[in-house]
Image (tube, coloured by chain):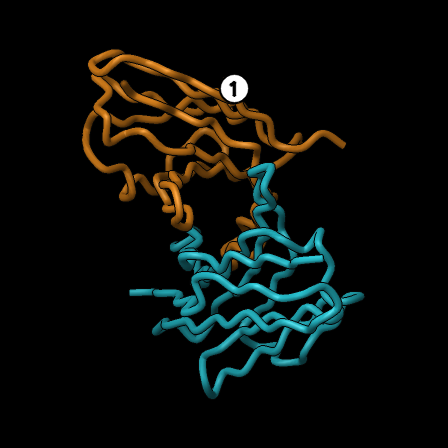
């Protein structure tokens, strides 16, 4: 069965520091998809990125970057020069491929607090 | 364009009452999902639909929970005889989905959720 582990429950940094959120996943499928979502204090769940299992190329979007490594089953998320507005709970999620298994399996989330 | 909407945003009910939670997906999205999120945890899958067909309901915790999507658009999640342990955030998501025999790859976009409190 699929599983996502976010070992860091809470992280606190000072503004402008870089911070990396860890995500480790387990799946027996060869085709799968990985996601990151952001849940700000207002409570909504905001999609950040999707990565499929065949594409290990790292991605950068502004201050955000993602490092996907199949060898270690990890999909880590780095925020460069963090800002107070980055304070939120961040969830990593996994979807197994194929015609079934459309559900997302989420990790427990990492609460990031960026202090001014 | 408009995102996923859910109503009500907050629902307080007494134990034993039935509740109905509504989800209006993004226009044109084929797939609709329901998740439940307890405080301090990640969302957990409940059920999902492609058009009006319920494809997977294995996440529904017991037979007090049911969902429907009769016209392939709006969906209702119903909880009968609510219990205090049902208190949680109920989230709906939708995705475009690709159904031509290939994997379902599309991103799920979430609504604001319904915060259910059972007294």
On the image, the x and y values in percent for residue A30 come to: 43, 75
User: B18 left or right of A53?
Assistant: left
Question: Which color is chain B depicted in?
Answer: orange
- Figure label count: 1
Image quarter of the N terminus of chain B: top right
Q: Which chain is cyan?
A: A
Q: From what the image shows, is residue B33 above or below residue A5?
A: above
Q: From what the image shows, is residue A47 above or below residue A94?
A: above
Nearer the observer, A12 or A55: A12
Nearer the observer, B11 or B61: B11
Most extreme residue toward the bottom is A71
On the image, the x and y values in percent for residue B50 come to: 47, 38
Q: From what the image shows, is residue A31 above or below residue A105?
A: below
Residue pictured at 32% horizontal, 29% vertical: B87
Nearer the observer, B14 or A29: B14
Image quarter of the C terminus of chain B: top left
Residue pictured at 34% horizontal, 15% vertical: B19
Nearer the observer, A48 or A2: A48
On the image, the x and y values in percent for residue B114 come to: 47, 27
Q: Residues within 10 Å of mark 1 (few under 14, many from 20)?
A: some
Res. B27 image quadrant: top right
Residue pictured at 27% horizontal, 12% vertical: B14
> Mark 1 falls within which chain?
B
Res. B18 image quadrant: top left
Q: Which residue is mark 1?
A: B7
On the image, the x and y values in percent for residue B39 come to: 38, 41
């Amino acid at each position: 069965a699929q599983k996502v582990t976010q070992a860091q429950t809470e992280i606190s940094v000072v503004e402008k520091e870089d911070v990396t959120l860890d995500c480790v996943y387990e799946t027996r499928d060869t085709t799968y998809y990985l996601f990151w979502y952001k849940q700000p204090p207002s409570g909504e769940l905001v999609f950040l990125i999707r990565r499929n299992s065949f594409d290990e190329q790292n991605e950068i979007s502004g201050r955000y970057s993602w490092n996907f490594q199949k060898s270690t089953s990890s999909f880590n998320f780095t925020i460069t020069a963090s800002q107070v507005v980055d304070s939120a709970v961040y969830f990593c999620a996994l979807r197994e491929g194929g015609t079934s298994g459309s559900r997302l399996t989420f990790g427990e989330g990492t609460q990031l607090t960026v202090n001014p | 364009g408009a995102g996923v909407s859910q109503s009500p945003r907050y629902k307080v009910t007494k134990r034993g009452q039935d509740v109905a939670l509504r989800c209006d997906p993004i226009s044109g999205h084929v797939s609709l999902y329901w998740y439940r999120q307890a405080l301090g945890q990640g969302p957990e899958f409940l059920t999902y639909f492609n058009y009006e067909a319920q494809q997977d309901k294995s996440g529904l915790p017991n037979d007090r929970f049911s969902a429907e999507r009769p016209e392939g658009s709006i969906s209702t999640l119903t909880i009968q005889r609510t219990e205090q342990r049902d208190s949680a955030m109920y989230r709906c998501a939708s995705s475009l989905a690709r159904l031509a025999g290939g994997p379902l790859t599309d991103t799920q976009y979430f609504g604001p959720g319904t915060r259910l409190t059972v007294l």
